[in-house]
Amino acid sequence: MDLGAITKYSALHAKPNGLILQYGTAGFRTKAEHLDHVMFRMGLLAVLRSKQTKSTIGVMVTASHNPEEDNGVKLVDPLGEMLAPSWEEHATCLANAEEQDMQRVLIDISEKEAVNLQQDAFVVIGRDTRPSSEKLSQSVIDGVTVLGGQFHDYGLLTTPQLHYMVYCRNTGGRYGKATIEGYYQKLSKAFVELTKQASCSGDEYRSLKVDCANGIGALKLREMEHYFSQGLSVQLFNDGSKGKLNHLCGADFVKSHQKPPQGMEIKSNERCCSFDGDADRIVYYYHDADGHFHLIDGDKIATLISSFLKELLVEIGESLNIGVVQTAYANGSSTRYLEEVMKVPVYCTKTGVKHLHHKAQEFDIGVYFEANGHGTALFSTAVEMKIKQSAEQLEDKKRKAAKMLENIIDLFNQVADRRVISTTNAERQAVTPPGLQEAINDLVKKYKLSRAFVRPSGTEDVVRVYAEADSQESADHLAHEVSLAVFQLAGGIGERPQPG
Ligand code: G16
């Protein structure tokens, strides 16, 4: 390690005095102007992680659903997964080290993790369309090169595409080609094959209106569009040609306001969906014949996917262990439906894809979705092999189901001060401040079929309040009352929460 060069270059990416950041739900997130030093340091850390694992590591520059002025960075581990928890701690230490402590922190990490500094390192980098992202990804590259790492800058990418690139490179191309064309070819082939086997056909099933949140999803879907040939016809909205990123559009807006995004006209029964700023969330929706809005969020997507998988497994005569993983935000009726009607075990983890992903790996097939539209299905290696064999050996009808499962596997691209509030029990109960949980329990008792919880966000400087009840009106009232309890008991600042 050339400590002199690190000190010299670090001074060019100086840390603002007193700024403390945390590697949160999905990496570091804050206003873009505060992130230059974090990016440089995450370039350094990615090199150490790459040397330690002898694998390619990914760095994604994005703040996903956050406003356009924010930015962020997350590291992607060798199998396309989120960074291991012990390295999240190293990331936080490194990001917060004062200039004079940088060398010591880097040496500490290398020693603790037994990093062989002579080992080669390779880092791949992607970024979203925020105005600040290009410069910030250059700071990542500065960090990578000063520690002697090699890199490939993919430029503009969606987050799932970066996860894919990392995994492809670390499997020597077995998973797919580590190029943008490779990604489009692999996923579109699986999709087109699946749609050929589907029982419903007709133009209405092939048309989809897509709200791209004025982000990277628009660029990448435009590139991918022609790979679908007749299989899918997309119409893009909020494609970044005018509006602001994530403003009045995108998956987070649609989910939290329960209405279509601005700039998209919907006729009854038209199929529509929204991405978020880095295109790793999706929610679907439509208006029925009476003009009522229906949202197919992560809870419903998980239910549809697990029912479909179960049906196919019954057809090929396999009884595999399927589990569904949700977070505290999952609507209680979706959990009841999965457990009581579908007879699928459901588990609850803390918010953050990394937590759900980890739990889902315990099953033959693990389906995980956050209500906000993040998720996928994971198939164990043994199951994947079994399905591939069945697709070759079984008689006609069963083989068709096995083929569909094989395509599904390819399609899923399976590759995770407000802190006065602390929580337990998969974030469903508040531990501090004292009295808050008791206040929530009393409020919940006032409404039928109700549930509520609060937790500090890991991506924004806010406290999130969740409430459900037997009617929209009761849920709104409960949410408002819980917000007031938080405001009073947790020392809220600014305006008191208003109803609605
Ligand atoms: C990130 C995480 C998600 C999480 C969301 C909100 O999403 O990847 O798992 O649900 O933040 O987290 P919080 O409630 O802690 O702010 P994204 O789409 O912003 O990367």
Image (tube, helix red, strand yellow):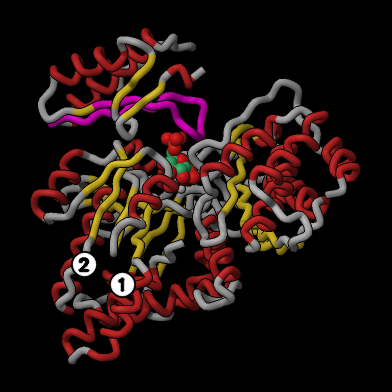
Q: Secondary structure at mark 2?
A: loop
Is the Cβ of the residue at disc 2 closer than 8 Å to that at disc 1? Answer: yes
Quadrant (top left, top right, bottom left, bottom right) of the C terminus: top left
Is 394 placed above or below 115 here? below
Mark 1 residue crowding within 10 angstroms, few (<14) / some (14–19) / many (20+) = some
- Disc 2 from disc 1: Cα separation: 8 Å
**Residue located 48% across and 54% down the image:** 279
**Residue located 22% across and 59% down the image:** 304
Is 239 placed above or below 433 here? below
Q: Is residue 429 visible?
A: yes
Task: Estimate the x, y position of residue 69 in percent, counting from the top left.
Answer: 62, 36
- Tag 1 residue: 383
**Residue located 37% across and 71% down the image:** 381
The magenta segment: 452-470
331 with respect to 377 (left or right):
left
Which of the 4 image quarters holds residue 454? top left
Mark 2 residue crowding within 10 angstroms, few (<14) / some (14–19) / many (20+) = few
Looking at the picture, tell me which residue is in the foreground, 2 or 239.
2
Task: Name the amino acid, label 2.
Answer: Leu
Where ligand 1 lies, by quadrant?
top left
Judge whether residue 424 is colored magenta: no
Task: Estimate the x, y position of residue 472 in percent, counting from the top left.
Answer: 19, 31
Residue 121, labelled with which disc? none
36 with respect to 441 (left or right):
right
- Tag 2 residue: 320
Looking at the picture, tell me which residue is in the foreground, 296 or 396.
396
Which of the 4 image quarters holds residue 394? bottom left
Along the polypeptide, which appears first: circle 2 or circle 1? 2
